[in-house]
Image: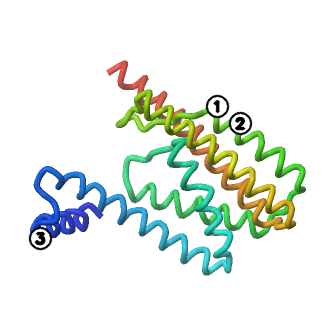
Amino acid sequence: MTKIAKVLADYVLYKGVINKDEYNLYEYGFQIALEMGLSLVISGIIAGMLHMVPEGILFFIIFIPLRSYAGGLHLKYYFHCLILSCLTFSAVMLVVRYVRLSTLFLFITLLIMEIAIYHMYPVENVNRSVDKEEDCFFRHRLIKFLILDMGIFLCCMLFKKDSYMMDIVITFFMVTITMFFGKYKNIRETKKFIFE
């Protein structure tokens, strides 16, 4: 992905769309877009093979904003991240397909995980800390998405969409787990950095 991103950045620089000062930013942007695009394509194929495209779309509607504003586990290599993302997505889809739990249990579980996510926030990447202004913005956005996600869940409950309710709760579970492991990894890396 890095090589393709470099080729694309070279091309827009050559065409005069950007100047040299913007090169690194565009190269990084292309790399992120390519990586996310590949992950979405693979996830779309998995959802299609399982005949669960609506559930797959709902997963990303819930997952992407939560992950963007709450943070989570960041792996060192893109390939590891891609494998973990695809395994996570597949696991969520399979649980949604084959497991049924009571609506009350799902509602209580979602409420607990929303509180846990709010209290674990932020899970920063050790390579990029968040300043006070960004923290305020991200926290405000996170609260909005938590409220919106609860609203989506309640609508699914009203219309008796059991698989969608399960999808939301399992997605929240995955976000909660990745936040927990992200915090744990950051603590370990910080301690390692202090003792070196």
Q: Please tell me how crowded label 1 is: few (under 14), some (14-19), or many (20+) other residues with Cα within 10 Å.
A: few
In depth, the one of 103 and 188 nearer the eye is 103
The mark found on residue 14 in the picture is none
Res 7 → quadrant? bottom left
Where residue 164 appears, as percent x and y from the top left, is 75, 65
Identify residue for label 1. 119
Q: Which quarter of the figure is the C terminus placed in?
A: top left
**Vertical placement of 18 versus 77: above or below?**
below
Residue visible at 59% across and 37% down in the picture: 180
Residue visible at 49% across and 72% down in the picture: 42
Are discs 2 and 1 less than 8 Å apart at CB? yes
Which of the two labelled residues, at mark 2 and mark 3, occupies the earlier sequence position?
Answer: 3
Residue visible at 56% across and 43% down in the picture: 141
Where residue 195 appears, as percent x and y from the top left, is 36, 19
Check the image and name the residue furthest to the top. Answer: 195
Q: Secondary structure at mark 1?
A: helix
Is residue 176 shown left or right of residue 39?
A: right
Residue visible at 64% across and 43% down in the picture: 176
Identify residue for label 2. 115
Task: Give the residue type at disc 1.
Answer: His
In depth, the one of 160 and 52 nearer the eye is 160
Where residue 55 appears, as percent x and y from the top left, is 68, 69
Q: Secondary structure at mark 3?
A: loop
Are discs 2 and 3 less than 8 Å apart at CB? no
